[in-house]
Image (cartoon, grey):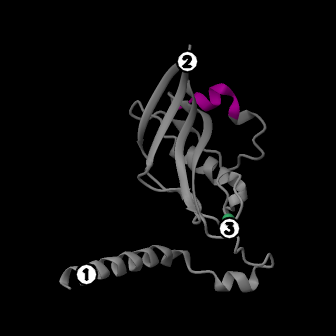
Amino acid sequence: MPQHLTTTGQSPVRLGGEMLGVAEGSPVEIVADVSNLGESLLVDATVYARVSGQCSRCLAAIDEPLEVRVNDVFGITPDFITRDGVAGGDVDEDDDFEPLFVQDDMVDITQLVLDETGLTIPFNPVCDDYGHECAEDTPSPDGISGEADAPDPRWSGLAGLADSLEDSTDAEAGKDA
Ligand SMILES: [Zn+2]
């Protein structure tokens, strides 16, 4: 019988791309089934988190739940790979295959989750990926002139800050009068 484990924590790394991803340190929940195969552990884990970022087309904020599932075998003894006969099988696409091991009674699924989210989270996310329509003022589809005119996403936070500073200045002025 697999052992059912649930754990929560903070993502030790950023997952996903520059436009959209799970921020380092943001909360994640992991639900895993772990089966002891004798020489190894079979880990089947589902990671729940939230991706946040921006649509690469209209720059609308994206904040959506993310669910990725990973599973792999972690060796308990150093020779589990050869005993399983994996090394002797068809490994044509596994030139850089590196066996995973249980270390200090823990399995590290970070790399598995990184790989999986790299495939799952769109590198150039658009609203449509999450079932939303893009904002009205979408740049022309050829994108060349539109992209040049689009505000640098890095400044959007500063723009909001400027607005709030203006507001507080107005309030100060009102108080003085
Ligand atoms: Zn959009």
Real-space Cα separation, disc 2 to disc 1, in angstroms: 66 Å
Checking the image for residue 2, the label placed there is 2
Note whether residue 124 is visible: no
Q: Residue at x 56, y 21 (%)?
A: 35
Note whether residue 157 is visible: yes
- Give the image quadrant in which the ligand numbered 1 is located: bottom right
Front residue of this view, candidates 69 and 105 = 69
The answer to whether the beta carbon of the residue marked 3 is less than 8 Å from any atom of ligand 1 is yes
Percent of width and height locating residue 18: 57, 66
Which circle's residue, 2 or 1, is located before the other in the chain? 2
Residue where numbered disc 1 is placed = 174
Q: Are marks 3 and 2 in contact (CB under 8 Å)?
A: no
Percent of width and height locating residue 119: 68, 52
Q: Residues within 10 Å of mark 1 (few under 14, many from 20)?
A: few
Residue where numbered disc 3 is placed = 135
Q: Residue at x 49, y 78 (%)?
A: 155
Real-space Cα separation, disc 3 to disc 2, in angstroms: 47 Å
Magenta includes 144? no
Q: Residue at x 66, y 62 (%)?
A: 123
For residue 118, side relative to residue 78 (left or right): right
Specify the segment rendered in magenta: 78-86
Residue type at the position of mark 2: Pro
Residue type at the position of mark 3: Ala
In this view, the mark in front (3 or 1): 1
Image quadrant in which the N terminus is located:
top right
Asked if 173 appears above or below 65 in the picture, the reply is: below
Q: Residues within 10 Å of mark 3 (few under 14, many from 20)?
A: few
The answer to whether the beta carbon of the residue marked 1 is less than 8 Å from any atom of ligand 1 is no
- Judged from the image, the secondary structure of the residue bearing numbered disc 2 is loop
